[in-house]
Amino acid sequence: QVQLQESGPGLVKPSQTLSLTCTVSGGSISSDYYYWSWIRQPAGSRLEYIGRIYSSGTTDYSPSLKSRVTISMDTSKNQFSLTLTSVTAADTAMYYCARDAPMIQGVKPYYAADLWGQGTTVTVSS
Amino acid sequence: DIQMTQSPSSLSASVGDRITINCRASQSISGYLNWYQQKPGKAPNLLIYGASGLQKGVPSNFSATGSGADFTLTITGLQPEDSAAYYCQQTSSSPWTFGQGTKVEVK
């Protein structure tokens, strides 16, 4: 079965760059129809979409983070990555990677995050 | 951005009870509404997609309805393992957004 696993440093200094990688096993990130997403959740807060990348490489970012975010994919390693620049304490959160899949309800597809990584905690602190 | 508002923010119920959680979008999202369950320290788990579609493996005591801007998640025959936070999510327009969550405690 397809599994996702986040990796990256758990501590980042303010103003520096946060870099995380999601390794996908059991399936190809090049498969059509799937989005590969990054979602974060500050402690005690709601989930927040950071952005996603389609199998073709097309990206879509949250407007509130767009100026600082890059999501890329490495098909040779079956990984996709998140880069967030100029971090502040407000970027401290649990970061999840997820697969958004088209789920058929009636005759229409509805995208939903059907697979998630376990999450990785990132703290921004000096 | 489309704002998602859930009510109540928390609730406590007994084993066997029926509960409902509401989710309202700041504009019509048709049926582009998903529900997730999140237990402490765990990633969210998809329960419902497309407003009413039950994800494979999710027990049938979970159900959901709604369209437009108002949606409801219902859990019947509440069990201790249903203690969790529940989130709605709209995928009608980017950025996809989540509600603030409803924390359910099963007594």
Image: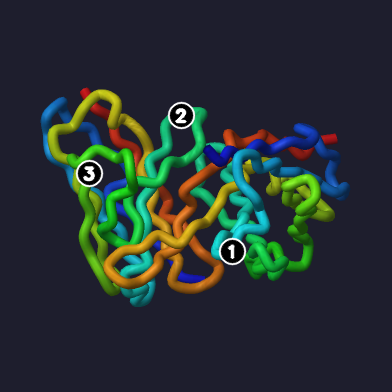
> x, y (%) of residue A49?
58, 57
Q: CA distance from mark 2 to mark 1?
A: 33 Å
> x, y (%) of residue A38?
63, 52
Q: CA distance from mark 1 to mark 3?
A: 30 Å
Q: Nearer the viewer, mark 1 or mark 3?
A: 1
Q: At 54% across and 42% down in the image, what residue appears?
A: A116
Which mark, residue B62? Answer: 3
Q: At 87% across and 47% down in the image, what residue appears?
A: A16
Tell me the element at label 1: loop
Chain containing the residue with disc 1: A
Could one spot residue A108 in this view of the protein? yes
Residue topped by disc 1: A32
Q: Nearer the viewer, mark 2 or mark 3?
A: 3
Quarter where residue B66 is shown: bottom left
Q: CA distance from mark 2 to mark 3?
A: 20 Å
Tell me the element at label 2: loop
Q: Is residue B9 above or below residue A107?
A: above
Please state which of residues A117 and A9 is positioned toward the viewer in this rendering.
Answer: A117
Chain containing the residue with disc 2: B
How many numbered discs?
A: 3
Q: Residues within 10 Å of mark 3 (few under 14, many from 20)?
A: some
Residue topped by disc 2: B40
What is the three-letter code of the residue carrying label 3? Answer: Phe
